[in-house]
Amino acid sequence: MSISPATLRLRTALFWAVPVLACALPLATNPYTQFVLNSMLISTLLTLGFNMVIGSLGQLAFANVAFFGLGAYASVIAMNDLGLPWLATIPLSGLVGAAGGFLASAVALRGIRLYYLAIVTLAFGELLRWLYIHADRLTGGTDGLAIPREGFLGFRLGDDTAQFYVFLAVTVVLVKGTLNLLRSRLGRSIVAVRENEIATASLGIPTARVIVTAFMWSGFLVGVAGALFAAHIGRVFPESFGLTQLIVGFAMVLVGGTGSVLGSVLGAVLLTALPEYVRAFPGMEEIFFGLVVIVVLLCLPQGLASLLRRLSPVFLERHFRE
Amino acid sequence: MTELLTVEGLGVRFAGLTALDDVSFRLSEGQVRAVIGPNGAGKTTLFNAISGYVRPTSGRVLLRGQDVAGDSPHAIAGHGIRRTFQNGGLFPALTVLENVLTGLTTETPGSFLDLLLGRRRALEAERAAIAKARALLELMSMGHMADARAGSLSGGQQRIVEIIRTVASEPPVLLLDEPAVGLSPVARAQMMEIIARLTGEKGVAVLLIEHAVELVMASADRILVMAAGKRIAEGTPDEIRADRAVLEAYLGHA
């Protein structure tokens, strides 16, 4: 289906309308709903990063969720030990996550793929968690680390509304950046590697560099999400970054739609919001979460994004940009 | 005619098995050389050795006099030797246009930051690549399929798109691995026309593996016949038709 210039303009307008309208949301929130909204933005970045390797590149690299913890710890340690303001730790956490992505890509480049990559990277994530517990001089062990109370230039980290605007700005910039990448020759190359790595190389595309870049950008996004998470919770401890986090991230990718930026946003928002509705009933959250995943995947195996794509070409995601 | 590709004494040995044994030939601008032979003759191994997918254990592959043997596949493709695949190498989830654009990747400059930030430099390169890809698709009467998913095309259309993608960056040397396999007579005729245009108008040197005899006889300038990893005959189509060794390789001893 070809996309007309009018549709393209509508798409651009829709893209920017979402964050502009979101700016008004804190007017209508209470402290609890504001907290949930902030969680959604963090989940969006986490899912966006995870989807990059799982969906677009098609590699079961589970370590990339572990970089969430890496980013969170990096942010808190940089604040406590280096005295950096929180805002400055955001790009730093991104770079730490990207470094983690670089290491994980080295495993994939050794020819360890699919289920083998899944197990190796799972073990890597658990190893990191072990490190958070045992490197207690740096990480505070099982108690974790608290973030300093006062922020930068009077910016109080504890203020959820102020956080919201920072989170929103960071998320919008990184979603836009990721869209730019996916619509460029790099995005095409990433999908090409997933579809047929041998044929990709035959076009003069350095497949190893493509894989490393995708892993690193994924790690960057997840690392940044970690820095936001640290400010959001006010404390980091090992239990936040275990298998549950991986399963939630994976579910968000699948429910939203693999390889889709729109899907990452939808999956993160839906699976953060829905369990909150049953929070009043203990134990129901997990069951409800599981039910939502099953129902969506049964009805829409390609995820929520595929439903919108069917409704209007505005939601088509393509890998080029005119 | 300029000599583009020179293969000298190329050999591939896997642990005791000789898959390719001392094969040599030359390929000039605008020339079509067919490689024929029974299954297991080493034709695809020859392609893999030239294009870097298998490391040759002996011999040289010269592109315009420069030895490229042993380079990685993407480096060899970057030098200008490009190939297609016997079982099809399209990316099914990408559209036809996006597939052709992947063939123009080396022609689309821009650093990571240019792409990330959507800088003008990167966007202009992207637009130029799209214009070129669309023009190529139009030229090959595939313009109307530009936005279709490659996976939804018929086998014949996929073969044609794969060739368009492979020649998009205008490589001087093209390796076609059974481009006509599974094609209808109409598509086969179209394929022959495309090959003729590439060699005649663009001066591309084509190395062609093909079982369809009429395609080989009609489009090849010279034919290399292989059996059991060795060259057993070489010559014009007429010479090959009359060659005893060839008949024996195909039909067994009479």
Image (cartoon, rainbow, N blue to C red):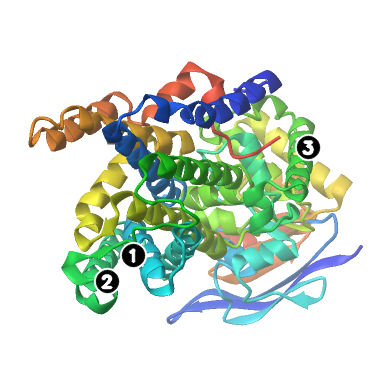
Chain identity of mark 1: A
- Between residues B233 and B21, which one lies in front from this camera angle? B21
Q: Are marks 1 and 3 on the same chain?
A: no
Residue B131, label in figure: 3
Tag shown at residue A47 = none
Secondary structure at numbered mark 3: helix
Looking at the rendered structure, the kind of residue marked 2 is Thr
Number of residues whose C-alpha sits closer than 10 Å to that of mark 1, classed few (under 14), some (14–19) or many (20 or more): many
**Image coords of residue A117 (percent x, y):** 32, 62
Say which chain tag 2 marks. Answer: A
In which quadrant of the rendered view does residue A297 lie?
top left
Identity of the residue drawn at 26% across and 61% down? A122
How crowded pointer 3 is (Cα within 10 Å; few <14, some 14-19, many 20+) is rated as some
Disc count in the image? 3
* Residue at left offset 44%, top offset 62%: A93
> Picture coordinates of residue B217 (x, y %)?
73, 47
Would you place residue A157 above or below residue B78 in this image? Answer: above
Q: Which residue is mark 1?
A: A73
